[in-house]
Image (cartoon, grey):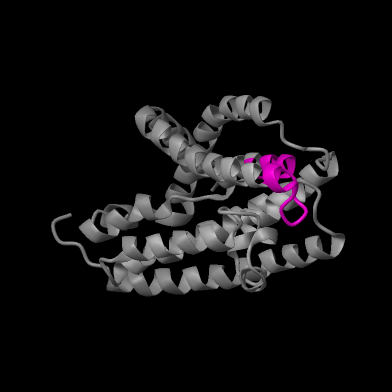
């Protein structure tokens, strides 16, 4: 099985290099929103002194960390697989002795992340020089703790995105559902703003949903802003959602493939 993943990695890594314009588009997509949010919140923090205890340097550290964490935990499964379900070309993948999502699509996501991260790091370093983030809370311990949090966060988001993509077996409106899904991520994951500055109702809801595990939890963990109790609770929540969404994906995939048909694909 390891050889299969290695071969898929080589193929997908070479393929990603063929779409350099696409890479630049996605890189701009990842940069624009956090930089806009950074500019807005740092301006407010400088004007007021702090916002819910966060200084301009705290916001700078948050959004610059968001740029890296977002790249590592996000997934693009719906854009890789939904059209194959709709036009019938998934039939070719189903004939192969590997799972179309848990192997090919997964490795494609990882190769895309790796190449995008290579392009992102130089830009990130320049931004650090420009905005002067406060990384005083970052330690080797917080970075080591964040590593499994990011891996679990990506696993949960990948399986959730794959489950959503599999709805294409039932509906042609899967991309509309995808937009709603990404809107929920922006609201409840801490992408728009740190959850600590969001309304109490949003904070209360977000702490039980999987979305904050994608971004807010790893970011706050890296920056050293979480108590040991909060860290333990969120790791337990990641494991819980990984099991629940893993079972959901298994059910949706099995029932969806039964419905799938392709004529002339």
Give the extent of the magenta segment. 45-63
Mark yes or no: residue 71 visible: no
Mark yes or no: residue 197 visible: yes
Report the residue that reaches farthest toward the left: 264
**Residue 107 at x, y = what percent?**
48, 44
Query: Closer to the camera, 253 or 129?
Result: 129
Q: Is residue 262 left or right of residue 74?
A: left
Q: Is residue 116 left or right of residue 256?
A: right
In the displayed structure, 26 sits above or below 249; it is above
- Residue 217 is inside the magenta segment: no
Residue at (63, 61) in percent of width and height:
212
Residue at (67, 25) in percent of width and height:
129
Q: How many marks?
A: 0
Report the residue that reaches farthest toward the front: 47
Residue at (33, 60) in percent of width and height:
175
Query: Closer to the camera, 110 or 202?
Result: 202
Of the 4 image quadrants, the one containing the C terminus is: bottom left
In the displayed structure, 47 sits above or below 24; it is below
**Residue 38 at x, y = what percent?**
60, 42
**Residue 57 at x, y = what percent?**
73, 39
In the displayed structure, 122 sits above or below 59; it is above
- Residue 62 is inside the magenta segment: yes
**Residue 69 at x, y = what percent?**
62, 45
Image quadrant assignment for residue 208: bottom right
Determine the main secondary structure of the stretch shown in magenta: helix
Query: Closer to the camera, 1 or 155?
Result: 155
């Amino acid at each position: 099985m390891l050889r299969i993943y290695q071969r898929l990695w080589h193929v997908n890594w070479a393929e990603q290099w063929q779409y350099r314009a696409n890479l630049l588009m996605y890189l701009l997509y990842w940069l624009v929103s956090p930089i806009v949010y950074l500019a807005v919140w740092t301006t407010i923090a400088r004007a007021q002194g702090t916002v819910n205890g966060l200084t301009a340097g705290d916001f700078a550290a948050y959004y610059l960390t968001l740029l890296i964490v977002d790249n590592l935990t996000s997934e693009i499964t719906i854009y890789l697989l939904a059209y194959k379900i709709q036009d019938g070309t998934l039939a070719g993948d189903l004939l192969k002795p590997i799972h179309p999502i848990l192997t090919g699509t997964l490795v494609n996501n990882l190769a895309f992340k790796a190449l995008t991260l290579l392009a992102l790091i130089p830009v990130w370093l320049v931004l650090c020089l420009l905005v002067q983030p406060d990384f005083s809370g970052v330690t080797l311990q917080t970075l080591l703790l964040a590593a499994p949090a990011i891996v679990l966060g990506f696993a949960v988001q990948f399986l959730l995105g794959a489950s959503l993509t599999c709805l294409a077996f039932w509906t042609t409106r899967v991309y509309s559902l995808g937009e709603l899904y990404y809107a929920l991520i922006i609201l409840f994951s801490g992408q728009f703003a740190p959850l600590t500055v969001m309304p109490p109702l949003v904070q209360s809801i977000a702490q039980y949903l999987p979305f904050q595990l994608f971004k807010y939890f790893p970011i706050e963990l890296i920056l050293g802003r979480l108590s040991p109790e909060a860290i333990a609770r969120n790791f337990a929540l990641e494991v819980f959602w990984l099991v629940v969404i893993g079972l959901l994906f298994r059910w949706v995939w099995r029932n969806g493939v039964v419905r799938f048909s392709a004529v002339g694909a």
